[in-house]
Amino acid sequence: MGKQGVLSVIVVAAAVLLSGCGVATSPARPAPSSPSPTAACPYVPEGPQPSNCALYDPEAAMAENERYREQRPISADAKAELNRRIPAVRKALEALPDPAGTKDVERAFEAAGFHAQDVRTDDTGRGIRFGAAAAGGCLVGFVGIDGKVELSPRGSILDGGCLAMSGH
């Protein structure tokens, strides 16, 4: 083999070594002693628990899922201010035509001194649910298709705002 042939063998060998082909660069990692969870599985007190699951308590998970509807506490001053506003709101809501629509309820709140962006409504098919933010709390309630008005001062919900949306 001439100089050209030897040089070719050296270049090929260097390329193989530099590319890592056929060369062990580090020892293989041992397999973990327990597999990583691949899914969430409900905890069942009776019987063995699967080792490839992240266990959870389904009852606790459902209860936690509903927390967004919980109401924050409201100060005595905020409650007093909301109670002061109830007569004007009630009068405006009771004056609505039967059955009232969401826009009617929103206009009634505006007529009672609320800002449009602070009022949320939801047509349930049996009437209009509403929540209106003011004075650090909410006036929430319902106007039935028969015109009956329910109205009370409350704290905002943990999810934010005054009205938990249907279907959540």
Image (cartoon, grey):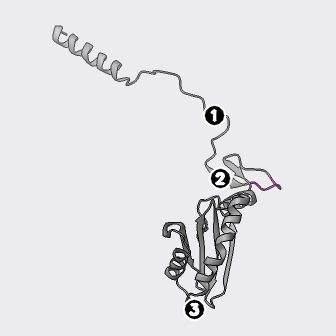
Look at label 1 and name its amino acid: Pro
Mark pair 2, 3: CA separation: 50 Å
**Residue ID at (66%, 77%):** 87
Mark pair 2, 1: CA separation: 19 Å
**Residue ID at (64%, 80%):** 90
**Residue ID at (58%, 62%):** 161
**Residue 105, image x and y in percent?**
54, 80
Q: Which residue is labeled 3 in the image? A: 98
Whether residue 127 appears in this view of the structure is no
Residue mark closest to the camera, 2 vs 1: 2
Q: Choose between 20 and 88: the one closer to the eye.
A: 88
Q: Choose between 69 and 109: the one closer to the eye.
A: 109
Is the residue marked by circle 2 packed among few (<14), some (14-19), or many (20+) residues within 10 Å? few
Look at label 2 and name its amino acid: Ala
Q: Which residue is labeled 1 in the image? A: 32
Point out the stretch of residues depicted in magenta: 43-47
Is the residue marked by circle 3 packed among few (<14), some (14-19), or many (20+) residues within 10 Å? some
**Horizontally, is 19 left or right of 103 in the view?**
left
Q: Main secondary structure of the magenta part?
A: loop
